[in-house]
């Protein structure tokens, strides 16, 4: 993101400029370390491998709580790595939930190259791993996604059964997302040429077809996915059990560090997960 801002500042405002966004521009791939810090926690950690597509083996962590009420399947946003998600992991597992978290293709030490279709395949494969490899009932699975990952979360939730869907700092559509990358002053002079494969994804359309319990949570001061996006998704949702939480002083990546966020998750889990018969 910094390189884009620097480029924009150098351009000046003398003429209109087009910035082309291809699929590769969306994915901020980073290499990371292993899960050593889990050794000091009471949680169970199992490093697993599951197959996405024909023969792409992805690594994930299945984290268990000794008194788990259900399982959260998490889809991270751009640049998300499970190895750097300490606050998120703590926020979810502290609510007596198991958690399955993984890196997309091309992230961390996973093979492959990120693409829209590839990430969707990864998301569906992660869900199928929980249901088929671990025999977890869909009624015990909460799909939780963040930022650009909400496009994957809604994609899976529309096609597969689950106990509920959490959209954290969600985006509506690709155009709305790119509009927020520029200050208003520069928008008349610079436009984004967004890859067509990105424009095909619309949370606004998908959420209008998903009826499972829905929690939409966003920081009031989020500069990337502002509350207006969350409000739009909440409004179009057809769920009979939906809630919108806008956290005062919250930004884009800091919500898991907050106690009010954790309380919101706890209440949603308790309502959405039905006790096993």
Image (cartoon, rainbow, N blue to C red):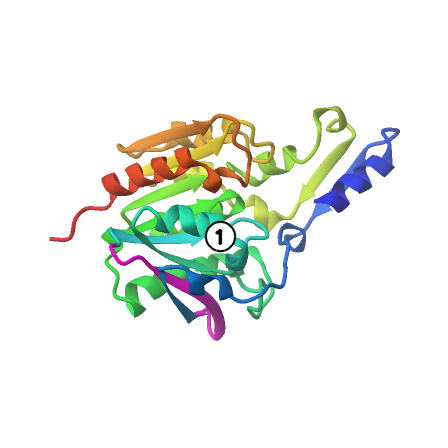
Percent across and percent down for residue 29 are 63, 58
Residue 194 position in % (x across, y down): 65, 44
The answer, for residue 208, to whether it is visible in the render is no
State the residue at coordinates (27%, 47%): 163
Outermost residue, front side: 40
- What secondary structure predominates along the stretch shown in magenta? strand
Compare residues 63 and 131 and report the one nearer the observer. 63
Q: Quadrant of residue 124?
A: bottom left
Q: Is residue 164 left or right of residue 74?
A: left
Residue on which the image places disc 1: 86
Residue plotted at (43% across, 38% down): 205
Q: On the rendered structure, is 252 left or right of 18?
A: left
- Residue under the image location 35 percent in, 65 percent down: 129
> Residue 127 occupies which quadrant of the picture?
bottom left
Front residue (pair 227, 203): 227
Q: Which residues are magenta?
A: 50-67
Residue 208 sits inside the magenta stretch:
no
| Apparent side of residue 91 relative to residue 253 in the rendered image (left or right) | left
Which element type, helix, strand or loop, lies under badge 1? helix
Residue drawn at 48 percent across, 25 percent down: 248
**Does the magenta-highlighted stretch encompass residue 56?**
yes
Give above or below for 193 relative to 260: below
Q: Is residue 135 above or below residue 69?
A: below
Q: Where does the N terminus fall, quadrant-wise?
A: top right
């Amino acid at each position: 993101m910094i390189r884009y801002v620097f480029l924009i500042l150098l351009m000046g405002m003398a003429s209109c400029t087009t910035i082309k966004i291809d699929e590769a521009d969306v994915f901020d791939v980073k290499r990371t370390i292993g899960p050593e810090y889990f050794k000091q926690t009471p949680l169970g950690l199992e490093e697993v491998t599951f197959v996405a597509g024909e023969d792409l083996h992805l690594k994930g962590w299945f984290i268990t709580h000794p008194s788990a009420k259900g399982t959260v399947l998490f889809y991270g946003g751009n640049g998300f790595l499970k190895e750097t998600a300490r606050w998120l992991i703590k926020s979810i597992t502290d609510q007596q939930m198991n958690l399955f978290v993984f890196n997309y293709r091309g992230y961390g030490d996973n093979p492959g190259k990120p693409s829209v279709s590839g990430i969707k395949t990864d998301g569906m494969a992660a869900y199928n791993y929980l249901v088929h490899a671990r025999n977890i009932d869909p009624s015990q699975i909460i799909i939780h996604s963040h930022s650009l990952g909400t496009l994957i979360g809604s994609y899976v939730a529309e096609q597969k059964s689950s106990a509920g869907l959490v959209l954290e700092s969600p985006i509506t559509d690709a155009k709305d997302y790119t509009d927020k990358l520029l200050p208003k002053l520069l928008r008349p002079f610079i436009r984004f040429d967004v890859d067509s494969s990105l424009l095909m994804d619309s949370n606004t359309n998908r959420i209008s077809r998903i009826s499972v319990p829905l929690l939409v949570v966003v920081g009031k001061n989020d500069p990337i996915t502002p509350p207006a996006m969350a409000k739009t998704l909440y409004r179009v949702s057809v769920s009979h059990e939906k809630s919108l939480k806008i956290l005062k002083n919250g930004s884009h990546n800091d919500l898991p560090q907050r106690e009010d966020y954790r309380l919101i998750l706890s209440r949603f889990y308790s309502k959405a997960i039905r006790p096993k018969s």
